[in-house]
Amino acid sequence: MPLHPGCAGSEDGFAQFEEMEDVVFHYLDVCVTLQLDHPVVAGASFGGWIAAEWAMRYSNTLRALILIDALGLRVSDAPTPDILSLDPAASRQAIFADPSATLALQVIPDTAKPEEVVSVLLAQQTLARFGWQFPDNPRLLRYLYRIAAPTLIVWGERDGFVSMAHGQAYHEGISGSEFKTIPNAGHLPHIEAPDACAGIMSSFLSKT
């Protein structure tokens, strides 16, 4: 489970990552370094966007692709809000099915703990570099047809950040893809409903 470049815990050198293509090359290099041959790549939210860009360009390097409430697409009638402009309460409302739940408050507290401030700021900086105001690639949708790896798309039915219309667009754009939804889950179904999400993923992988 790699830490994205620029996020807390990753190595220095974030300045070299100027666009999404740089991040894709980074992960291709990671695979070479770790001798990973045709891995299964699963990404959620921003990680899903990275995974989709990777698969769109270098689909032949993957055994399978799993997108979980992935950013990346520009859907005209269902725009993604600028999450960086929202306060913690509004962010919880957009991301979680139950924004008042203990889990939601733990993941997005009203005030970050002192030891977590740096992590939060770095994550925001990373997202801002690639998705300031518009967390998407307006050209990605037209090239989804290039993704040839077996693909599973998982979406929380109550995602208020990246609506299910984006999941449908990924599904329609990627030939042969599977599209599964999880009720009573928002933008992070792997966190809100981990057992259900893991079951869907395991079933998919057993077939691929």
Image (cartoon, grey):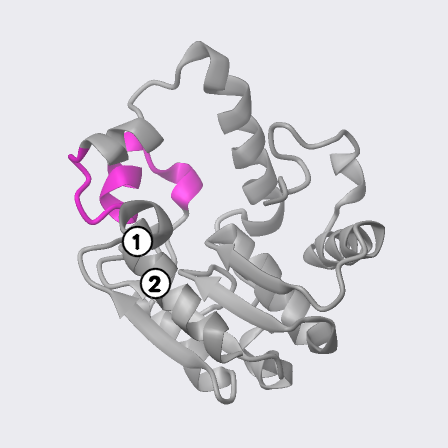
Q: Which residues, given as a range, are shown in magenta?
A: 83-101
- Residue 97 shown in magenta: yes
Q: Farthest front residue?
A: 206
Q: Where is mark 1, residue-wise?
A: 195
The foreground one among 133 and 205 is 205
Q: Gap in Å between the C-alphas at discs 2 and 1?
A: 6 Å
Taking the spot 45% from the left edge, 10% from the top edge, the residue there is 114
Locate residue 36, reporting x and y percent: 75, 59
The foreground one among 17 and 182 is 182
Q: Where is mark 2, residue-wise?
A: 199
Amino acid type, residue under disc 1 in the picture: Asp
Q: For label 2, count other residues whose C-alpha is less than 10 Å away and answer few (under 14), some (14-19) or many (20+).
A: few
- Residue 3 shown in magenta: no
Q: Are marks 2 and 1 in contact (CB under 8 Å)?
A: yes
- The quarter of the picture where residue 112 lies is top left
Query: What is the secondary structure assignment of the residue under circle 2?
Result: helix
